[in-house]
Amino acid sequence: MNRPGLPPLPRRLSAPAVHAPARVPGQAAVRSQVLENGLKIIVWSDHSIPSVALHNWVRVGSRNEVPGLTGLAHFFEHMMFNGTARHGAGEFDRLMEAQGGSNNAFTCDDVTVYQDWFPRGALDLVFELEADRIQGLSLDPALIESERGVVHSERLLRVEDNNAGYLSEQVQAEAFLVHPYRFPTIGLPADIKSWTAQDLWAFYRTYYAPNNQTIVLVGDVSHEEAFALARRHLAKLPRQPQPPAILVREPEQLGERRVVVRRAAQMALLQYAYKAPAAADPLGPALNLLLTALTDGNASRLHRLLVEQRMIAQDVAAEWHQGFDPSLCWFWFTLAEGVDPHTARDLIDAELAGIAAAGIDAADLQRAGNLNAAAFWKQLATIDGKAHLLGEFEALRGGWQQLFQAPARHAEVTREQIAAAARLLLNPRRRTVGMLLPQAQGES
């Protein structure tokens, strides 16, 4: 879950177009080391501006939670800014801002990521602050209760008082029978109210171990300087037992599941959640281009059909959740006022069935490649974008080196491969359909 002001974690890798460069330049500027305590440091030396981006990828999310203790990963995203035995509440932000730096964080199903942006002169300070909160977090009872209230308010805003968020939570819970991906990242209301100090300490010691984290630095810093700072500040953190592996595997879904919600609303909502592969699956490039062709921009297939031609929807979007384990590919449809969602569903299903049978045409493939190329290279042009992509590939896609092969892999995607991906993904038997129907005030 993002702190205010941070855009959501990209779940779908931006894919370059057919004519994009075959390789991402700069691999020679990247080096990595693993400290004796298991903490990995990845450094991309880029002296284009006198600044540095530091991202700390902690391998913990709602995937690591259990019934009764949901929402802890997101809660710690908040608590990690609330002081240590050495630096009191608010000091992390104050010290960084005094040096011209800023910070943020987000949590999702698989990871929690902490982000710092600062002038290179603040390197030593930022390393000291990060080392301090990794090992010395203060779980003061008053701060716990204060943040518990903040998280509860955030849940009200994002879920309880948000029709799309409420429906998505219901669909997600229905889509998974046993896998912890069924838990909402923000946590369930009863769990948020009932975490104990013992629960929090156990979670912190288990998942905030150095051997469960990867720190990525990009910017005006040499490899030698970065590794020396890491050894000075981070090597002393004690290694912990490896967190318990997630061994649960979701059984194959053999029939469509449905969720119908009636709430006070102006427009009906329709959501499809298809079972989809994990982030590192070889089908990834084809799925990326398929989703871009279907929903990205006003010229996308579903936007043209539903918003411009038939005028039954106000908005269309899609997202493939790419995590450690097979998860979901979402389609969201905000219907136009007064549109019967059953009628909309029939039209959408007919279009998706046609795509599953025939794939997309050459023009749609070229357009999808061009759109994704623009987004990919734009992200890679900044030190923050480089840091995010390095961390994403290291954590979820088989290693940071894979980033530099991504353009070639996407450029090789054919229409036949996209058609095969569409047949696999767009299977009605492997989806959960959510429908939110407007309910008049006072109607039971």
Image (spheres, grey):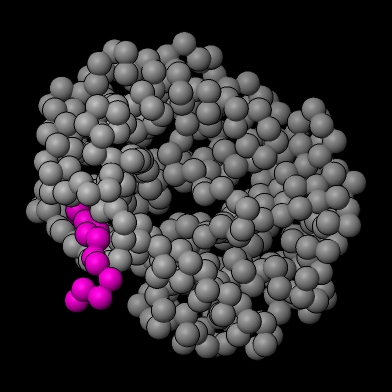
Q: From the image, which quarter does the C terminus lie in?
A: bottom left
Q: Is residue 435 magenta?
A: yes
Depth order, front residue of 222/381: 381
Position of residue 139 measured from the top left corner of the image (x, y, whole percent): 66, 82
The image quadrant that residue 174 belongs to is bottom left
Q: Residue 110 is drawn in which quadrant?
A: bottom left
Residue 422 in magenta stretch: no
Which residue is drawn at the image coordinates 60% and 32% (left, top)? 379
Percent of width and height locating residue 158? 46, 63
Tell me, yes or no, if residue 415 can be seen here.
yes
Would residue 174 be seen by someone viewing this image from the given angle? no
- The foreground one among 399 and 323 is 323
Span shown in magenta: 432-444
Q: Residue at x 52, y 69 (%)?
A: 154
Q: Is residue 101 left or right of residue 77?
A: right
Look at 11% across and 41% down and name the residue there. 346
Kindly indicate the quadrant of the structure image that contains residue 291.
Answer: top left
Residue 340 sits above or below residue 438 on the image: above
Does 250 sit left or right of 180 as displayed? left
Residue 50: percent from left, percent from top = 85, 36
Of residue 160 and residue 361, the one placed in the foreground of this image is: 160
Front residue of 334 and 123: 334
Count of marks placed on residues:
0
Locate residue 378, reporting x and y percent.
Answer: 60, 27
Side of 39 where 358 appears, left or right = left
Q: Residue at x 18, y 34 (%)?
A: 352
Residue 24 versus residue 126 in the image, above or below: above
